[in-house]
Image (cartoon, rainbow, N blue to C red):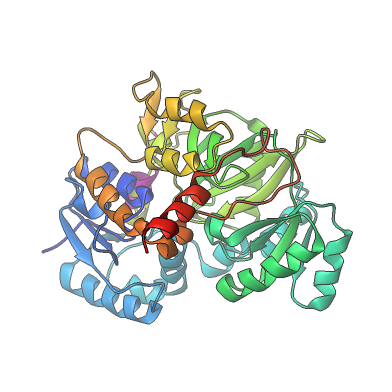
Amino acid sequence: MDFDVFVPDGSTRISLAVVRSLGRKGYRVACGDDRLFSMSTHSKYCTKPFRYPSPSNSIKKYHDWLIDFLKKHNVKVYLPILDITTKHAVKNQEEIMKYTNMYVPDYDSYISLFQKNRVSKIAKKIGLNIPNSIEITDQKDLNKVKELNFPVIIKAIESAGGKGNRICNDYGEVLGNYNYLKEMYGECIVSEYFPPGGDSIGVSCLIDENKDPVNVFCHKRLRQYPPEGGQSVLCKSYEHKEAKEAAIKLLKHVNYKGIALVEFKINPEDGKLYLIEVNTRFWGSINLPISLGMDFPHNVYKLALGKKVKKNVNYDLGVMCRWYAGEFLYLLRAPNLFSHIKELFRINRPNLHYMDIDKRDIMPSVFRFLSLVYALNPKIFNQFVLPKPQLKVNLNNSYKFSLSNFYKKFYLKYSK
């Protein structure tokens, strides 16, 4: 069977948005994942589901499976989603594009934005504000961390999401977290941590072959998990001219093409806009611009086939998008627990879209629930519930109650 597009990483809400976007337009969408319970593969817009070897366990096995799959099914376009499949696609694009079409940047421009140490140097060179940072390569670099103002945040150089970040209040915490993160994710960078209060802004861009922006979309995070910095749980369409100009300036400087989400933070202490990082792939809140008529997945699909895409940078402001499953994660760390429980039941609101649930396509939500059964094991629970930082800075009056700690104590006490 032939397919118009293959979308991997089907267990994510990002893939679900892409599958729905293209499936609603009548494309034959194949979707795959390495897990049994996968949201996107059970969408009614998925023509046929596939299960493949985990790229996290063996990228070679995934590569071999992908090439064989593309040979058998005459796939027109391959749209990688997460960092691991995107990096693999960029690195191996010459071979992959013998059997399908893709729209990805060249490796040099990709890696210059994908790695946090490189993008920081580039941003500083072109005049963008960045937090004071130190790349850790040896003991001398670790000693320099003492010169930063605490608290600081330590991050894996190559993106690992919120799991690759730790907030540290002193040098001792930096040492402990560095050893853990280096073992799990590789080299790290330490940056000053901005206190709560400033807006977190994302600028989503699609750049064409001429290095001109086709789509530019801006959103502001209203709620995120973890609360001190992470994925959008609730966000809204927004306008921030300075952030848009800075994002385009950065992408053009490295001759980038393709999609990217450039993330900024306003430091409440000086009111200035700072570059935080760049996601060189599709992002979690992708359904917000899709809902407003700026269909990034469809435009990437068309560009991969060499078709022209009409420039569109206009959209309605103040429209919100919610990750409903993420609201339950946020519940574990909500500053005001009981107030947020009430918020969970405010489902139908004007100008509100969802990143995951859709009454016209309910099965992905059912399988998302089934996949959470695995979380009943405390070992697995710890993998997706991030550790609560013992922050000395005030995060909305601090946390008075932790459902995650309560759950683990209760489970361990009564499950023996």
Q: Is residue 229 visible?
A: yes
Across and down, in percent, residue 132 comes to 80, 54
Position of 301 compared to 407: left or right?
left
Looking at the image, residue 281 lies above or below residue 285: below
Looking at the image, residue 34 lies above or below residue 265: below
283 drawn magenta: no
Which residues are the magenta region?
A: 294-301
Q: Report the magenta stretch's main SS.
A: helix
**Residue drawn at x 36%, y 77% as measured from the top left:** 95
Looking at the image, residue 245 lies above or below residue 165: above
Q: Residue furthest right?
A: 147
Q: Residue furthest left?
A: 1
Residue 352 found in image quarter = top left
**Residue drawn at x 77%, y 54% as measured from the top left:** 169
Position of 80 compared to 267: left or right?
left
Residue 350 found in image quarter = top left
Q: Nearer the viewer, residue 136 or 343?
A: 343
Across and down, in percent, residue 283 comes to 46, 48
Mark count: 0
Q: Residue furthest top?
A: 350
Across and down, in percent, residue 264 comes to 65, 43
Q: Is residue 213 visible?
A: no
Task: Quarter of the image for the N terminus: give it.
Answer: bottom left
**Residue drawn at x 27%, y 56% as measured from the top left:** 38
Task: Quarter of the image for the C terminus: give it.
Answer: bottom left
Q: Nearer the viewer, residue 325 or 280?
A: 325
Q: Nearer the viewer, residue 231 or 368?
A: 368
**Residue drawn at x 30%, y 80% as measured from the top left:** 64
